[in-house]
Image (cartoon, rainbow, N blue to C red):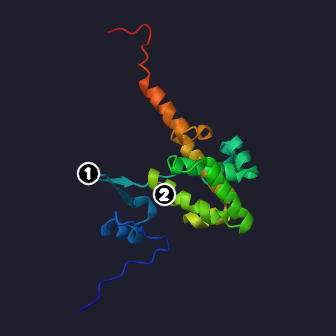
């Protein structure tokens, strides 16, 4: 009896969630990243397949948003804190995440290992491709560029990073409560 052929080795990490099926795990071994789909399992047990999408901006497009670039260059802890608050959907505050990032940076110099986990969470929430390489590699080699890219990605989804998660939720509620605007000179 011949052993089953093994898929080619792929250095990207496999999803370890119990919500990921074996067929989806095999996609990570056999398909290019752009062809992988992920499953979003809902509470009621139904699942939806989502193709992975590219980032809204490139890793080195820092100057597309100069204020964010400057903030990240001089105070990466603030940029990271804002990203973490949004990715955690308000469960952790910007101040707490930024302080922990600063503490890790001062003690070990390896805050990039902490921030790379948030990149992975962000990619999972928005079904983003893991590009140009693994999350930890991107953060260890280009920490400021990766933070800027994540910040721009969240802004591209309509989030106002400066008001935090709870401010964005309150803004959405206000916008949802407004009556629709009637255009003048509209005819039936």
Residue 4 % position (x, y): 29, 84
Foreground: disc 2 or disc 1: 1
Residue 130 % position (x, y): 51, 61
Can residue 61 be seen at all in this image of the molecule?
A: no
Secondary structure beneath dot 1 equals loop
In the foreground, 188 or 164? 164
Residue 142 % position (x, y): 67, 61
In the foreground, 128 or 165? 165
Mark 2 Cα-neighbour bin, 10 Å: few <14, some 14–19, many ≥20: many
Q: CA distance from mark 2 to mark 1?
A: 27 Å
Q: Where is mark 2, residue-wise?
A: 129
Give the residue furthest to the bottom. Answer: 1
Residue in view at x 74 percent, y 51 percent: 73
In the foreground, 54 or 143? 143
Q: Is residue 151 left or right of residue 36?
A: right
Q: Is residue 163 left or right of residue 51?
A: right
Mark 1 Cα-neighbour bin, 10 Å: few <14, some 14–19, many ≥20: few
Q: Where is mark 1, residue-wise?
A: 44
Does label 2 or label 1 sit earlier along the sequence? 1
Residue in view at x 66 percent, y 42 percent: 65
Residue in view at x 37 percent, y 58 percent: 38
> Relative to 30, is 39 above or below?
above
Q: Is residue 46 left or right of residue 145?
A: left
Secondary structure beneath dot 2 equals loop
């Amino acid at each position: 009896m011949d052993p089953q052929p093994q898929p080619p080795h792929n250095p990207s990490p496999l999803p370890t969630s119990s919500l990921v099926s074996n067929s989806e795990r095999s996609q990570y071994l056999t398909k290019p990243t752009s062809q992988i789909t992920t499953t979003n399992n809902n509470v009621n047990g139904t699942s939806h397949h989502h193709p992975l999408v590219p980032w809204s901006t490139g890793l080195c497009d820092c100057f597309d948003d100069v204020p964010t670039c400057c903030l990240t260059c001089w105070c990466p802890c603030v940029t990271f804190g804002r990203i973490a608050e949004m990715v955690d959907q308000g469960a952790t505050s910007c101040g707490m995440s930024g302080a922990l990032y600063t503490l890790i940076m001062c003690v070990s110099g390896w805050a990039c290992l902490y921030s790379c986990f948030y990149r992975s969470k962000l990619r999972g929430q928005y079904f983003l491709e893991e590009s140009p390489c693994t999350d930890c590699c991107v953060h260890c080699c280009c920490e400021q560029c990766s933070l800027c890219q994540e910040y721009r990605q969240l802004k591209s989804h309509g989030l106002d990073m400066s008001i935090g998660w709870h401010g964005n939720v309150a803004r959405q509620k206000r916008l949802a409560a407004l009556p629709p605007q009637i255009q003048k000179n509209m005819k039936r």
